[in-house]
Amino acid sequence: LGHGSGGLLTNKLLDSGVFDLLSNPILDTRHDGAFLELEGKTAFSTDSFLVSPIFFPGGNIGELAVNGTVNDLAMCGAIPKYLSLSFIIEEGLKVLEFWEVLVAVKFACEKAGVHVVTGDTKVVEKGKGDKIFINTSGIGKVHSKANISASNIKKGDKIIISGQVATHGMAIMSVREGLEFDSEIQSDTTNLNHTIISLLDQFGESIHLLTDPTRGGVATVLKETAQSIDLGIDIFQKDIPIDDQVASACELLGLDPLYVANEGLFIAFVAEEVAEDFLSELREDGNGLHAKIIGTVTEQHPRQVILESAIGGKRVVSMLPGEQLPRIC
Amino acid sequence: MLKTFKIQVGGQVQGVGFRPFVFNLAQKHQLKGTVSNNANGVLIYVNGTKEELMNFMEDILEKAPDAAIIQGHSMDEIEPREFENFSIVPSQKTAKVAIPLTADFAICNSCKKEIQDPSNRRYRYAFTTCTQCGPRYAITQKFPFERALTTMGQFTMCESCVIEYKNPKDSRFHSQTNSCIDCGIKMKLLANSGEPISVENEREILSTVARFLKEGAIVALKNTSGYLLCADATNPEVVKKLRERKQRPTKPFALLYPNMEKIREAFHVSNHEQRALESRVCPIVLLDAKQQTKGHLAEGVAPGLDRYGVMLPSSALLTLLAIETQTPLVATSGNIHGSPILSSEKEAREKLSTVADYFLNHNLEIVFPQDDSVMHFADKQRILLRRSRGLAPNLMGYTPKPSEKVLAMGAHLKSTLAFTPNGHTYLSPYFGNLDSYEVLQRYTDTLQRYTQLFEELPEVVLVDKHPAYQSTILGKELATNWKVTVVEVQHHKAHFAGVLAEHDLFEIKKPVLGVIWDGTGLGDDGMIWGGEFFVYQNHQIELKAHFEYFDTLAGDKMAKEPRLSLFSLVNSEAEVEDKFSKAEIKIYQKLKENSKLGTSSVGRLFDAVASLLDVLDVSTYEGEAALLLENLAWQYPGECIDLLEGKSFGNVPSKAIMERLIALKHKGESKAKLAASFIYTLARVVVKMAITFKISTIACSGGVFQNRLLVQTLMGMAEEDDISFLFHKEMSSNDENIALGQLAYYQNIKE
Ligand SMILES: [Fe+3]
Ligand SMILES: [Mg+2]
Ligand SMILES: [Zn+2]
Ligand SMILES: [Zn+2]
């Protein structure tokens, strides 16, 4: 890809078909901004994506950027509609690579049923970026039955995870560190909005909280939640779904899978009465084949997340302060 | 003219028979007045002339009960008051407590005799105590130390006990824990199912327990400091069963022997060791087994080790049990999965029912449960391995800045708390790994009890620099709640300050070399330290040298798998080929190439050597590799090789040590010789550093200095090279001293 960050090159880039590929009536107006018709309660979310390497088994940064924001909207109980898309490209990125990312964006949008309605591209000098950074923001209409708020969480609520943990993080780790395992670990990045919407149709307000355990993993999300609700959380190691290959990779590297990042995964706090139905419904969905009830909200030990290990014994789960530094003296 | 004096005695003077002692002394001196406990210790009002009082005071100081530790006294003349006699008056709580908490005392010899004498009314009473022995800290609810303020308060003394309590000539005169079989603590024996096992006579309960033990049962027994799991140590099946049920594959078990004679028959015991065993602390002491003993004891007691943890009965209960069984018993803390020692019947039922066949309970509530303290000796040097019952919670050796109320949160794996609410240092017993929810609860409970007991909240909270220690996380949270400052102290500087504090060296003019070697701590440079050389001078600590960094691999897993340390330290894969699969080698090679986190850990260096010498590749308990390596090294009686001979260095070349070892291993040198030479080399490194920096006072801290051979070798070199080595005294050298170190660092070191 070219050099400098002048408007010319950017326009050229745009003219060369970036927005043709993502074509839709709103984007096609090529105005400075998008005109949107919104009514009712609306959710708005933004995220920036920096992942190294940008291509990894099971996906690339393009679909990650779309799915990330789509999922954040879904976690708000919203039906994602519109996205903005901004690229910050490091000089020297191969054109082919860029197109590959762009195509991934396009397909991810189609799959999620969202439109990119505004966008931007900047090129930075070599060394000032890491191949490509993407920012996406998204707007969605909140589902009529949704009432998602940590303050709805009650004692006895069940904590349900939609699939196997640590998959995305280990997929990235394996390519980044050049680790070869018996078979390739694929990222689980995917859009969760259709799954969530159909669950909301059915369970509405019984779904108290939806959250995606991305950075910092399941542990960090649960600890943050426990602290915000002033209740405790009990989880059971034996119930936490994990792929054998991923589990042994974590074991080998001395990583705790609970702290490893996930992508196509969500955690739901649901009312005790509907938990089993919610679970079987979720399991019917392609994104929930491995879904499990992993824990319960409790009045014991407020603000603490306690993991009951497979051999018994209770472990304190805390937030990950940066990397997993050794502590054993 | 009538003169009245007020005498105040401070220190560990409550719960040690001090008031009855003063009473009897006053009778002897024919003085009138009163004695009571108060917030500052023991308070005496007495009439007499100045001269009479001087004599009286002298006697108090000289003849005080053995268990007392006097820390300061004062005598002032006050407004004259008339007394008709000399009496012990009830304590009045007029101020916040400001004396040490009395530690638990092991059963004394005279109580031991009474419980074995069929004609004595305390024959076979399992909770026999006197003013000189019994639980103290374990049962303390409030202050001062008065029966009503302990969990003994729920037991009402019978007439016979009251008579003893009131009789100045009796050894139970004013004994706060006084009780007998008629009025005292009741035992209950239960089967695993919870069904009570009926015993005709209470005095027979322990014979029944002894019978069960001999038949190969595991018994969870509530001692006065917490539950112990007991089993016949000469029965291999039951020891194996205990290991399986407790899920503790190899970590050595401690042994209970009925008396010193039996211990001497089975082990080599030095004078220092004997004195420790028979002391009021009554700790577990590690002893060298005689040849025949190893055959006699079940192999599973201490797999792969020639030394055993041995103790005498610390209570009447254990005395009676040990006498009944006669055979050595495994007596290990009643817990599971690294949770803290249990002390309530309910918890024991819940947690130990998969382990114990029988439960021996009693109805004395334990407020502060404690493990047994553990120690061993390098000649005369006592090396504490675990500071708990009998030693906690006082730390007499460090006087904090009087007005500063500091709370030090300690480390993570061997957590302890230090608190200075009133000019004394209280240092909690060892709690354990704070990742365990139960341990964290015990830790926070204790913290809360301390703040209630002393009626003070800290004004500053000290934590380790490591952000992921539970103690750091909790300390920061508490500081926020209390709206006080939190200060981070680097782990190894805390270790160094800890040993400086124990030797009161902060005002010394000459520089002190700090040799701080342990497993892991987060360094100031973001690396994982564990092999540091500091210099202390003029209230400053400066890092001077360290072991050369080598790559950390696989986070905390590295500490659990000594073979990973070896992997990190060798240049050629050939040395580790047989310890890993091909796929693992590929992956770890990659991790090593990508590793950005270096470590100077001597603990990991020990691990690597243990793996190289095929002592241990994967460990099942903390410190296992170092322990086994030391065990191997002791087997070598000859001359050692300095593995760094002829090499000059600034930072210690860890890899050069490994290379030399590998070369010698290939030459066919014995593994014992190599193990011994490794430890010898480390000792030489210390001496070389002392020479380089021209410093003759060397203070050692960190878990590595639990190694007896290393300490003994250093002390040998001290004489040759005119160096003085300082080790921890009241503290263990491991992370149990971090709380003290944080405190001492904060109060004495300028950044
Ligand atoms: Fe340490
Ligand atoms: Mg996000
Ligand atoms: Zn006694
Ligand atoms: Zn009685």
Image (tube, helix red, strand yellow):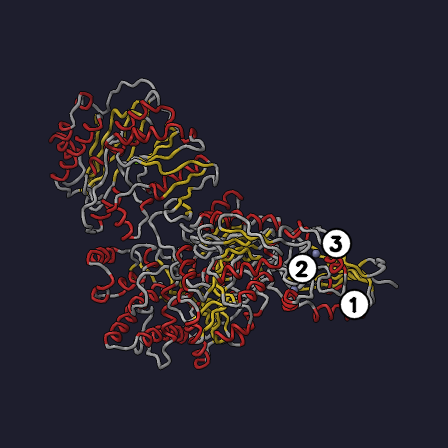
Query: Numbered disc 2: what chain?
Result: B
Q: Foreground mark, 3 or 1?
A: 3
Residue found at x 82% / y 67%: B30
As drawn, the residue found furthest toward the right would be B1
Disc 1 residue type? Leu
Q: Nearer the viewer, residue B457 or B556?
A: B556
Determine the CA span between mark 3 and mark 1: 23 Å
Q: Which mark is residue B90?
A: 3
Left or right, A138 with respect to B166, comes to left
Query: Numbered disc 3: what chain?
Result: B
Q: Earlier in the sequence, mark 2 or mark 3?
A: 2
Mark 3 neighbour class, 10 Å CA radius: few under 14, some 14 to 19, many 20 or more: few
Q: Which mark is residue B14?
A: 2
Residue found at x 25% / y 24%: A81
For the N terminus of chain B, the image quarter is bottom right
Q: Which residue is mark 1?
A: B53
Query: Numbered disc 1: what chain?
Result: B
Left or right, A243 with respect to B703, comes to left
Q: Earlier in the sequence, mark 3 or mark 1?
A: 1
